[in-house]
Image (cartoon, rainbow, N blue to C red):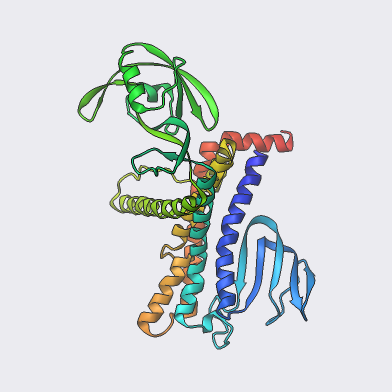
């Protein structure tokens, strides 16, 4: 559990730090003063400031002098980072080095930069993954230059009344062996299962790096208005796929946009279902759930953790660009309104909207976190008991 917490903190720190780095770098480039750029969240441990060509240390909570040089700080809460930009809340609009005093297009660039950096991070991580070899599905679009190894059959669907679901098989499980035999293709496995109708076979599955054995009876079941013999699962052929570096970069970029489209469609479907009152059909994970999933990815190997980090970074980018107050997308919405109206919305009203949006988001986080604790509470409470010797 301790390893999971450490890995989760590191992953989240990288994703958030890269996001804030986007805001920081574009603000500096566009002539906006940055008061502080921090690694981790306050309170501050210490910081560095460049004064008269020399770096000087600043300890503790010492306030930042107005119009002083940027402080680069290390903070006590080891998660993510932050950037404090002059005029980001609408103050000092008359100053030439204030965010509020810049043209709308410059403010748009500074706001969007964080999202863009998260997308770029996803591209880089996936490119690295494809360079070293990453799990991928095998299909007709696979490049002839791809180097394929560790072929496997992964479960992507469970029939509601199938024998596999009854036996406790889960989506994501990999079929390692059936009665001691290994299979590389779906057709080979289906042929074998069909020839063993009404028999109970020993299945060996790999679930998050651990081997699990189950005895499952082969029987007929209905699939797409026809009778099929098996255990009631949908499969996909997967393998570790590696590319030469020049193709790995290309594949990383393409995969990022494919993932992005899939996430946007998923979000749109969830929102539509919520509006019309239909069950969403998806599970939402909060901080606790994401921490657990991060730990599971880490156990499976560095490449899986790399892939999961890329997915989290892309999710953060898409969520952040949503037109909701307190998010980057919400700030963009107010800039669009300013452009249409020819004048800015009163700063008091915008700040109120962002504060309300923040409270709503925190409420949703707490609600989802409660669900995570209910789902994963056994391991979490066991960890706390071990810490305090209860």
Above or below 103: residue 12:
above
User: Where on the picture, by quarter, is residue 225?
Assistant: top left
Q: Please report the residue visible at 68 percent of the width from the left and 35 percent of the height from the top.
A: 385
Q: Position of residue 211 (x, y in %)?
A: 53, 24
Above or below 27: residue 364:
above
Q: Please report the residue visible at 66 percent of the width from the left and 36 percent of the height from the top.
A: 383
Considering depth in this image, is 157 or 335 the residue closer to the camera?
157
Considering depth in this image, is 7 or 206 the residue closer to the camera?
206
- Residue lying furthest left in this view? 225
32 relative position to 186: left or right: right
Considering depth in this image, is 238 or 174 the residue closer to the camera?
238
Q: Position of residue 310 (x, y in %)?
A: 51, 51
Residue 369 seen anywhere in this rendered image of the structure: no
Q: Position of residue 374 (x, y in %)?
A: 52, 38
- The N terminus - image quarter: top right
Q: Position of residue 226 (x, y in %)?
A: 21, 25
- Residue lying furthest top in this view? 199
Above or below 377: residue 39:
below
């Amino acid at each position: 559990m301790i390893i999971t917490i450490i890995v989760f903190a590191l992953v989240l720190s990288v994703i958030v730090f890269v996001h804030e780095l986007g805001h920081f770098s574009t603000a500096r480039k566009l002539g906006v003063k940055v008061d502080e750029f921090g690694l981790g969240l306050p309170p501050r441990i210490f910081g560095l400031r460049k004064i008269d060509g020399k770096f000087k240390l600043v300890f503790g909570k010492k306030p930042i002098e107005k119009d002083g040089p940027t402080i680069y700080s290390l903070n006590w809460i080891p998660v993510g980072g932050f950037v404090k930009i002059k005029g980001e809340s609408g103050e000092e609009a008359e100053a030439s080095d204030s965010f509020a005093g810049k043209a709308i297009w410059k403010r748009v660039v500074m706001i969007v930069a964080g999202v863009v950096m998260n997308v770029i991070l996803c591209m880089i991580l996936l490119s690295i993954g494809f360079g070293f070899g990453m799990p991928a599905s095998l299909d007709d679009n696979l490049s002839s230059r791809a180097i394929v190894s560790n072929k496997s059959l992964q479960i992507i669907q469970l029939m509601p009344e199938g024998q596999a679901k009854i036996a406790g098989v889960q989506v994501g499980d990999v079929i390692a062996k059936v009665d001691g035999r290994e299979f590389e293709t779906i057709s080979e496995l289906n042929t074998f299962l069909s020839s063993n109708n009404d028999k109970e076979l020993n299945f060996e599955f790999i679930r998050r790096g651990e081997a699990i054995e189950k005895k499952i009876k082969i029987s007929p079941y209905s699939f797409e208005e026809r009778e099929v013999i098996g255990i009631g699962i949908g499969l996909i052929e997967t393998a570790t796929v590696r590319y030469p570096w020049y193709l790995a970069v290309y594949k990383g970029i393409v995969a990022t946009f494919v993932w992005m489209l899939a996430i946007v469609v998923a979000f749109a479907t969830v929102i539509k279902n919520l509006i019309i009152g239909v069950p969403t059909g998806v599970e939402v994970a909060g901080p606790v759930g994401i921490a657990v999933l991060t730990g599971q990815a880490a156990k499976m190997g560095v490449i899986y953790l790399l892939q999961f980090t890329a997915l989290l970074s892309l999710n953060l980018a898409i969520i952040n660009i949503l037109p909701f107050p307190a998010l980057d997308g919400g700030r963009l919405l107010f800039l669009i309104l300013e452009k249409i109206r020819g004048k800015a919305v009163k700063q008091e009203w915008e700040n109120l909207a962002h504060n309300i949006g923040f409270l709503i988001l925190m409420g949703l986080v707490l609600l989802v976190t409660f669900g995570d604790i209910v789902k994963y509470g056994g391991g979490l409470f066991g960890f706390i008991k071990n810490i305090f010797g209860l």
